[in-house]
Image (tube, rainbow, N blue to C red):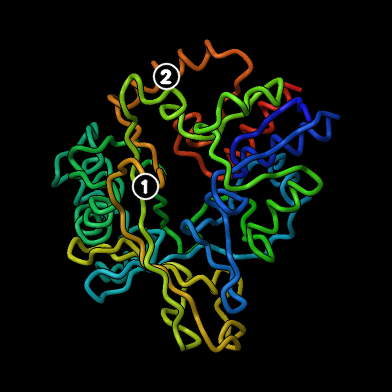
Amino acid sequence: MHYDYLVVGSGLYGAVFAREAVKAGKTVKVIDKRPNIAGNVYTEDVEGIHVHKYGAHIFHTNNKKVWDYITQYAEFNRFTNSPVANYKGELYSLPFNMYTFNKMWGVVTPEEAAAKIEEQKKEAGITEPKNLEEQAISLIGTDIYEKLVKGYTEKQWGRDCKDLPAFIIKRLPVRLTFDNNYFNALYQGIPMGGYTKMVANLLDGIEVELNVDYLENKEELDKIADKVVYTGPIDAYFDYKLGTLEYRSVRFETELLDKPNFQGNAAVNYTDRETPWTRIIEHKWFEFGKDDEGNDLPKTVISREYSSEWKPGDEPYYPVNDEKNGALYEEYKKLAEGEKNIIFGGRLGEYKYYDMDAVIASALDMSEREL
């Protein structure tokens, strides 16, 4: 069989593009080197709990077009992301809000909190933040930076905060209210039945073949379609001939526990430098809210997350969007533009730190232009 499009990767970008192509009357085959669909949003059922196998994914967007699109393929619950920070046994509210400021400084009014942040910012003498440390202190003061940002960020990126660009922390929510909702997004939630079910709905009726490594079988696979939509790492596509783009990777230690409730929240961040993991996810609370409903399930599943430098063979998660890697990506992008009949897309294909809604928007945008 010959196809109009061969889609490499069944994550969000690949699945959305495939669905749109089929809607436009095109023939499509999707392949994935993993034994399952859904890429990094893959969820698997363990004792009735949908476990986020490749890390926590919380859908949030202000883009109504994306929301209207994706809700055709899944019903979303009303999950609100309200993580907790654990600093050596002290618990703080994330995002940084009046609960955080009250616990940290004993302040009660927004005015007092703002004055305290301003005072610490002045003491640090920062006018134009040059790196992540200075950016963080200018947003939330020295105390909160030292306890709740520094250790966590250095574990996550494997670099000193002074060596990280300021923009990484621009998305840090700081609120002079008691709002515990981490994302400032109009639409938010988790697909009922898990993300795998949502991606299966996107791919419904489309031919999918798993356990197929495109790069190992490129020559013969390229022959079966007019065009290829490639969502793997762009440097791997070109056999790393200009050098390797850097990523951060994440390793998970997942346990099934014989108790109904481990930490009472979906996400607890461990913000001190000494605790080796960055956070613990308790998967059931993504779907059962904060009430007692989740306690009806006698067991719970937790995942400890450890951040590490990516090396070949690891799963690439976060692009390291610094100057050096940005310049290398631009070189690969030029090579990509010279490849006729290949579309590069998604987090790995475009070397971008994408949220899920942005991946969907990018795939919809590409399919509109292409189809």
The percent position of residue 116, horizontal first and vertical second, equals 25, 56
The percent position of residue 168, horizontal first and vertical second, equals 35, 40
Quick check: 46 above or below 197?
below
The percent position of residue 162, horizontal first and vertical second, equals 18, 40
Residue identified by numbered label 1: 314
Mark 2 secondary-structure assignment = helix
Q: Depth check: give the residue in front, 6 or 203.
A: 6
Q: Name the mark on residue 168.
A: none
Q: Depth check: give the residue in front, 208 or 190.
A: 208
Residue drawn at point x = 56 percent, y = 48 percent: 39
Q: Is residue 247 left or right of residue 371?
A: left
- Which of the two labelled residues, at mark 2 and mark 1, occupies the earlier sequence position? 1
Give the quadrant of residue 321.
Answer: top left
Q: Name the mark on residue 332.
A: 2
Residue drawn at point x = 26 percent, y = 74 percent: 90
The percent position of residue 123, horizontal first and vertical second, equals 13, 47
Give the quadrant of residue 356.
Answer: top right
Query: Looking at numbered disc 1 in the image, what kind of residue is underneath it?
Result: Asp
